[in-house]
Amino acid sequence: MGFDQGMPYLQSKLQLNKEFPFKIFRYASHPLQQPMHMHEYLQLAYVLKGQCQHQVRGKSLVVGKGDVFLILPGMEHSLQSMADKEYEVVMIDFLPDLIAEPMKRYYQIRAPRFAVTAGEDWIASLPNAWLHIGKNKQILFEQLLQDMQDEYEIKELGYEYVIQLSLAKLLVTMDREFRKVKRKSTQQPALADQQPIDEVKRYINDNYSQDIPLEHGAYLAKMAPAYFSHVFKKETGQNFVDYVNEVRIEQAMILIRRNTHTITQIGFQVGYHHLSHFIRTFKKRVGITPTEYKKTFGNTP
């Protein structure tokens, strides 16, 4: 470990294997309070479940399932757990040279006019710092992470090559998702405020089972929380909390009609940690309790 103006600076020669500079590990549901620090290598972190807090470039944000952040060399950041919040994060440390060739080739194909630049410095084209992986890509993303961890732990013949391929595919997936978000943001320039709100609404519909504080919605929309709250209500006709509850209760009604889970199980599945809160919110929005709704609309076995 080195120091940069008093800040811990983690060096690859101390953190990574010289022959194969790659490491994958997990943090899960225990107190975690990293100091602000930097690396001379790349670090990728993906939130598998729950929520934690990530500080990067002077910003503090709550990250949840499907969020991935790529920390470039020399970028100061820290990861911290939150009181009474479970979480699980997969971390990957690696040197750029590990996958330089496949990534150079990818950027040469993606942008042939800039092939020379991309080939010399592909790392500059990587998605910057933070990205949310949509629900339809989360299964692929998580399978690639699991494959890499299995290869890293078992170390069968050729495991290094398999990890390189999986890591390259992971970064290509990130780049495609990142460009998809950029395309959407340029398709409707006249709707500068509406488009971020649509992104937040999609996030809520994908992640209603997770805790989604207003601050996280504001970060997704790249707005200050107070301004985000105002714009969200203007665009949807509801405040943020009411909208989240509406999505959850609508999903709860679907699950109740299927009659395959108990009321308690359904409450947890749609994001309520306390049964009393679920019942109270359900009755407020539907007019009857979940149990009464089940008696009226639930399918009989």
Image (tube, helix red, strand yellow):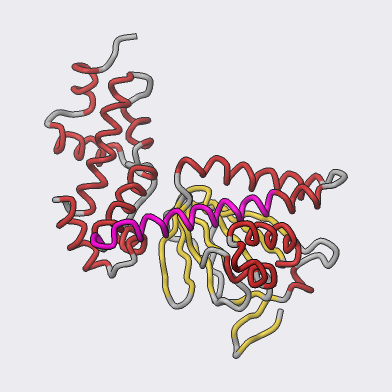
Q: Is residue 297 above or below residue 135?
A: above
Instruction: Please give the range of residues in magenta.
Output: 166-191
Q: Residue at x 57, y 46 (%)?
A: 141
Q: Residue at x 29, y 26 (%)?
A: 254
Residue 40 lies, in percent from the top left, at 68, 76
Q: Residue furthest bottom?
A: 5
Q: Is residue 32 above or below residue 156?
A: below
* Quadrant, the C terminus: top left
Q: Residue furthest left?
A: 287
Relative depth, front residue between 247 and 265: 247
Q: Residue 275 is drawn in which quadrant? A: top left
Q: Residue at x 37, y 23 (%)?
A: 261
Count of numbered tags: 0
Q: Is residue 3 magenta?
A: no
**235 horizontally vs 8: left or right:** left
Magenta-colored segment: predominant secondary structure: helix
* Quadrant, the N terminus: bottom right
Q: Residue furthest top?
A: 301
Q: Residue at x 31, y 41 (%)?
A: 274
Residue 78 lies, in percent from the top left, at 53, 71
**290 horizontally vs 143: left or right:** left
Q: Residue furthest right?
A: 157
Q: Residue 99 is drawn in which quadrant? A: bottom right
Q: Is residue 215 above or below residue 148?
A: below
Residue 53 lies, in percent from the top left, at 45, 63
**36 horizontally vs 199: left or right:** right
Q: Is residue 178 magenta?
A: yes
Residue 2 lies, in percent from the top left, at 70, 83
Relative depth, front residue between 26 and 279: 26
